[in-house]
Image: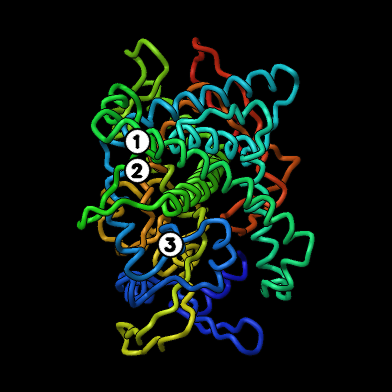
Amino acid sequence: MQYVDELVGRYGHSCLWWFGPWLPILRLFHPEAVKPVLLESAAIAPKDYMFYGFLKPWLGDGLLLSNGAKWVRHRRMLTPAFHFDILKPYVKIFNQSTDIMHAKWRRLVASGSTSLDMFEQVSLMTLDSLQKCVFSYNSNCQETPSDYIAAILELSSLVVRRQHRLLLHWDFLYHLTPDGWRFRRACNTVHHFTADVVQQRHQALNRLGREAWLKSKQGKTVDFIDILLLAKDEDGRDLSEEDIAAEADTFMFEGHDTTASGLSWVLYNLACHPEYQERCREEIKDLMRDKESEEIEWEDLSQMPFSTMCIKESLRLHPPVTAVSRCCTEDIKLPDGRVLPKGNICLISIYGTHHNPAVWPEPQVYNPHRFDPENSKNKPPLAFMPFSAGPRNCIGQNFAMAEMKVVLALTLLRFAVRLDESRPVRRKPELILRSENGLWLHLEPLGPSHESRTPAPRS
């Protein structure tokens, strides 16, 4: 991460960087350089498979990895799955999964474990909520081990390890290694689980018929598999079981790690800045003052302006996805007249753009006021892109933001978070931005009669 900061400080706009002696990579880290590539059509600027190809055996041809006509068709069919009316019932699930996590925290704190690794805790919570939103399945994975959850966590770790070992980039070598065997075994676990759910749901739909099946869902939360089963393209064609499974696996992968990273880092940043933490807490207490229960509702999410600013500033400073890559099929002209030649890898540095001093003064400082509407109205649209941008932006960004707001609000309402000074934080970019040895924070439970008090400032 420090090296990216050096490149941005030295070149400001973009640079050519060599991966070994034979592979040139164009690194872009300014809105003007990023815009022509990110806003180009998906056909002209497809994803580059050097960085994404290792995920293919796991995720198949889902939205993350597909290209061309298939990607266009699936994107159009899946967009309704993330409409606000579909997302609203998920807020109750976010509340439930957060309640389970907080009950566990209180038990751990009572037993003497006041410092917890946020990445470990929050990742299990997001996986728990996703299984419920995607499959209507409760594995109780926050409390008891789950083979499916363990397989997803192992796959994420193995993909990162393979990226860093050049010889294992060749499939025939990788498949001979212990890591390759573990990867195939974990893939089988994930695929069997997803295929079983999809097959059972498909059989129920065929047995009852569309109308009766829809009637049986009335009053219940419609999950992601339901929506995929009902999706039709403009020619009235359904998604195949294989396509549905690929999209479900993709959403499980993309939805848990990125959101867990975003939440862990915002809690860390608020632990570093107790004055912002307390202001968020007061905002949330005001929001909850006249409520009969401690439950965040959909309508509350728009009533948290300062907390939202804190989340956005954390996503700027610590973007869960630090870069995305494209390999353009046509030459791309930059505003200054230079050309990005077709066939070359373009690495769009989200982290670099977010830390570019020409775009964000004092980029290493955590300052939520950057996202005050008055302060941000003159910023270029691509100065802030934690969910990427353009035709291939993250389709689940509203889902992720809703979950982060619910979890942050309930956490600050019930706990004060402080840094664990004995465990220094060192950023580590993998599939998502995490911390090298975990991200450990002290938790102080706050009772219902808690009188607001600011945690001790960071030394």
Distance between mark 3 and mark 1 Cα atoms: 55 Å
Quarter containing the C terminus: top right
Residue position for label 2: 229
Q: Position of residue 221 (x, y in %)?
A: 35, 28
Do tag 2 and tag 1 residues touch (Cβ < 8 Å)? yes
Q: Residue shown at 73%/43% (left/top)?
A: 423
Do tag 3 and tag 1 residues touch (Cβ < 8 Å)? no
Q: Name the amino acid type tagged 2.
A: Leu
Camera-near label (3 vs 1) is 1
Q: Relative to the observer, which residue lies in front, 347 or 449?
A: 347
Q: Position of residue 29 (x, y in %)?
A: 45, 72
Do tag 3 and tag 2 residues touch (Cβ < 8 Å)? no
Dot placed on the residue nearer the N-terminal end, 3 or 2: 2
Q: Position of residue 308 (x, y in %)?
A: 37, 40
Residue position for label 3: 361
Pick out the residue farthest to the left. Answer: 234
Decide if residue 66 is in sight here. Answer: yes
Q: Quadrant location of residue 335?
A: bottom left
